[in-house]
Image (cartoon, rainbow, N blue to C red):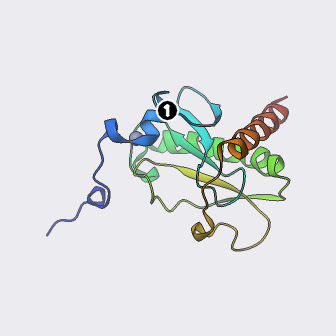
């Protein structure tokens, strides 16, 4: 039997929460965006200040992006990593792409302090006030890094 990876997560673009966020049709604590990407806080962060960077185009997996689009996505991963860590007072940003959870390519950027801090079992829902404050810190750190 043929097995398509998409069978793991049958999902249409219209029902995709990350597409809806990218189009401004679903609420999110957006911390940065450009014409091709949106970065916003994970509402179930592994650690406070956990950012998800997604391409606006709907693809399920990062390896479905063109080589150029993949390179542009990961250039922003590089540029956002230090501000994400700085905003949380963490020494480093951990990056681990498992691709599960939502079937729209996403790169988690998580402030980390020690090995194991990226464990998805650490995810916990964050309250709106905490997310709002964390988003403001991340936006400020990004603005500072760009200046
Ligand atoms: Zn999508």
From the image, which quarter does the C terminus lie in? top right
Q: Is mark 1 within 8 Å of ligand 1?
A: yes
Image position, residue 80 (x, y; %): 71, 43
Q: Work out whether residue 1 can be spotted.
A: yes
Which residue: 84% across, 59% down?
91
Image position, residue 20 (x, y; %): 43, 34
Which residue: 39% across, 44% down?
59
Q: Is residue 57 left or right of residue 107?
A: left
Image position, residue 99 (x, y; %): 46, 58
Of the four image quadrants, the one with ligand 1 is top left
Q: Work out whether residue 56 can be spotted.
A: no
117 to 145, vertically: above or below: below
Q: Is residue 84 left or right of residue 43?
A: right
Q: Residue furthest bottom?
A: 115
Residue underneath mark 1: 22
Front in this rendered view, residue 74 or 46 = 46
Front in this rendered view, residue 46 or 94 = 46
Name the image quarter holding residue 135: top right
Q: Is residue 112 left or right of residue 101?
A: right
């Amino acid at each position: 039997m043929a097995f398509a990876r998409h069978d793991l997560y049958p999902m249409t673009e219209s029902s995709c929460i990350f597409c809806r966020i990218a189009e401004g049709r679903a609420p999110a604590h957006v911390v940065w965006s450009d014409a091709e990407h949106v970065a916003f806080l994970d509402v179930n962060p592994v650690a406070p200040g956990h950012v998800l960077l997604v391409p606006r185009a709907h693809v399920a997996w990062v390896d479905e992006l063109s080589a150029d689009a993949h390179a542009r996505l990961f250039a922003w991963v590089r540029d956002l990593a230090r501000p994400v860590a700085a905003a949380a007072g963490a020494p480093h940003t951990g990056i681990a792409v498992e691709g599960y959870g939502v079937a729209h390519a996403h790169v988690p950027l998580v402030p980390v302090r020690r090995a194991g801090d990226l464990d998805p079992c650490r995810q916990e829902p964050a309250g709106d006030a905490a997310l709002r404050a964390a988003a403001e810190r991340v936006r400020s750190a990004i603005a500072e890094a760009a200046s």
